[in-house]
Image: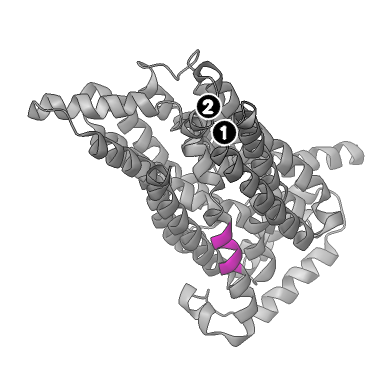
């Protein structure tokens, strides 16, 4: 009976990971990738809508500008969501923040679903902004929630599941965006509105699962609720050691209020941690990996991949990152964070250089386009091995309970700002 109880409690942690992930970083990856499939259809819709209003077509460079804004409003919303994430996590708690966050998803799905009927590309733009806000909140709160709920020996691997759900969302978005499914010229409003499905799944499952024990004890001071949450998450295991560790951290915090983001920069004791967070958070977006998903089709066309094969090559990019993050989750506790980060960025530098050379020489050799496509896959694999997952768990491991929400806000604001700039400028660079 006790063994069955322990097995059941192990499932509670797994279900917590899945419920937080499906409406959290899964949404980030999903909405990042689904915008790639209807690129031409949304541009045509924008032009047609403008022509119906004014009687004149929109110039090509302005169509491209509107499209760049549609793509870039997603990270701009993420920036706003990152600013909201800290106050929400402190005021409502980690679990309730994730649940309330689905308001933005429902509103965005409604706008997407009726945009074509209303003849308004502005509704698409506003919807992208709102799903960005949702992604900004969940990208910060989910790893915080899971990192605080996981046992110490599994904390790295559990926090890494945020990257796994991001990669899974990317793959699912690419699959659903196939022309045979929702990627056709008439179905693109439904494709964009399909973000409602993971949101509903989270709303149905997450309320049944426990809040972060660390939040309950250290932020709320509720020892009974903390113990109840630990018992649900850990089962019949001896909790004395973990409770002692939590009480020790609570005493170290000394009843201090949660720190504000700007206070982290003025604390000499946190200077090295903040510098690490800023450098690695900026590098994660400036490397351009996430921009690849928004403009993957155009990149493969540029590399002279046959048009009928492009959509399947795009699915391969998401599959590469999913595979790499799964491997990284398994080895992170054995290999360590530094090795995965340094190895990932070194490999990305190598493959990015080869890719650039292949694009320059593609008219000289018939096999160069396939080398360029291989480099894209290798680049994404290298990203998934280290930077994709390790960067997201740094704030959990480098900062205490009072500084953690502020650290996630700093990292989130930086990452989303970089993603906005890269997403806005990428098509013009191409």
Quarter of the image containing the C terminus? Answer: top left
Residue under the image location 56 percent in, 28 percent down: 314
Q: Is residue 228 visible?
A: no
| Front position among marks 2 and 1 | 1
Helix, strand or loop: magenta stretch: helix
Reply above or below: 71 against 175.
below
Q: Quadrant of residue 400?
A: bottom right
Q: Nearer the viewer, residue 132 or 254?
A: 132
The picture places residue 376, in percent across and down from the top left corner, at 62, 38
Whether residue 125 appears in magenta in the rendering, the answer is no
How many labels sit on residues? 2
The picture places residue 211, in percent across and down from the top left corner, at 62, 53
Give the alpha-carbon distance from disc 2 to disc 1, as whole Å. 8 Å
Q: Is disc 2 in contact with disc 1, using a CB cutoff of under 8 Å?
A: yes
Give the labeled residue for mark 2.
Answer: 304
Give the labeled residue for mark 1.
Answer: 362
Q: Quadrant of residue 64?
A: top left
Whether residue 280 appears in magenta in the rendering, the answer is yes
The picture places residue 95, in percent across and down from the top left corner, at 56, 50
Quarter of the image containing the N terminus? Answer: top right
Q: Does residue 189 appear left or right of residue 304 in this picture?
A: left
The picture places residue 311, in percent across and down from the top left corner, at 53, 23
Range of the magenta residues? 277-283
Residue under the image location 62 percent in, 30 percent down: 365
Q: Nearer the viewer, residue 324 or 28?
A: 324
Label 1 element class:
loop
In the drawing, what numbered circle is on residue 104? none
Task: Work out which residue is located at the far front of the displayed protein and give it.
Answer: 364
Q: Is residue 120 visible?
A: yes
Label 2 element class:
loop
Task: Work out which residue is located at the far top of the displayed protein and give it.
Answer: 180
């Amino acid at each position: 009976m006790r063994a069955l109880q322990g097995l059941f409690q192990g499932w509670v942690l797994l279900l917590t990971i899945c419920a937080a992930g499906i409406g959290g970083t899964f949404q980030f990856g999903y909405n990042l990738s689904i915008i790639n499939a209807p690129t031409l259809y949304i541009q045509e819709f924008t032009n047609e809508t403008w022509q119906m209003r004014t009687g004149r077509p929109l110039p090509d460079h302005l169509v491209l500008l509107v499209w760049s804004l549609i793509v870039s409003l997603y990270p701009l919303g993420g920036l706003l969501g990152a600013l909201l994430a800290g106050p929400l996590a402190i005021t409502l708690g980690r679990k309730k923040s994730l649940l309330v966050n689905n308001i933005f998803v429902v509103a965005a799905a409604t706008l997407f679903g009726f945009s074509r009927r209303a003849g308004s590309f502005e509704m698409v733009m506003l919807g992208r902004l709102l799903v960005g806000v949702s992604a900004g909140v969940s990208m910060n709160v989910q790893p915080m929630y899971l990192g605080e709920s996981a046992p110490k020996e599994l904390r790295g691997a559990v926090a890494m599941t945020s990257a796994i759900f991001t990669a899974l969302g990317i793959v699912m978005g690419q699959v659903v965006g196939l022309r045979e499914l929702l990627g056709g010229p008439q179905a693109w409003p439904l494709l964009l509105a399909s973000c409602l499905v993971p949101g509903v799944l989270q709303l149905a499952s997450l309320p049944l699962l426990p809040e972060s024990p660390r939040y309950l004890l250290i932020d709320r001071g509720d020892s009974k609720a903390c113990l109840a949450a630990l018992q649900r998450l850990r089962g019949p295991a001896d909790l004395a050691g973990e409770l002692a560790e939590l009480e020790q951290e609570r005493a170290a915090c000394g009843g201090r209020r949660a720190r504000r983001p700007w206070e982290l920069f003025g604390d000499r004791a946190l200077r090295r941690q903040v510098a690490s967070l800023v450098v690695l958070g900026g590098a994660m977006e400036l490397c351009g990996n996430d921009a690849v998903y928004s403009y993957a089709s155009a990149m493969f066309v540029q590399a002279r991949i046959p048009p009928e094969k492009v959509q399947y090559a795009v699915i391969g990019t998401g599959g590469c990152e999913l595979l790499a993050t799964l491997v990284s989750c398994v080895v992170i506790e054995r290999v360590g964070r530094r090795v995965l980060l340094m190895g990932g960025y070194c490999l990305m530098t190598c493959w990015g250089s080869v890719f650039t050379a292949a694009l320059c020489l593609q008219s000289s050799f018939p096999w160069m386009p396939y080398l360029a496509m291989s480099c894209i896959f290798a680049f994404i694999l290298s990203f998934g091995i280290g930077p994709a997952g390790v960067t997201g768990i740094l704030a959990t491991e480098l900062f205490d309970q009072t500084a953690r929400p502020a650290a996630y806000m700093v990292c989130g604001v930086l990452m989303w700002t970089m993603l906005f700039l890269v997403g806005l400028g990428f098509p013009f660079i191409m």
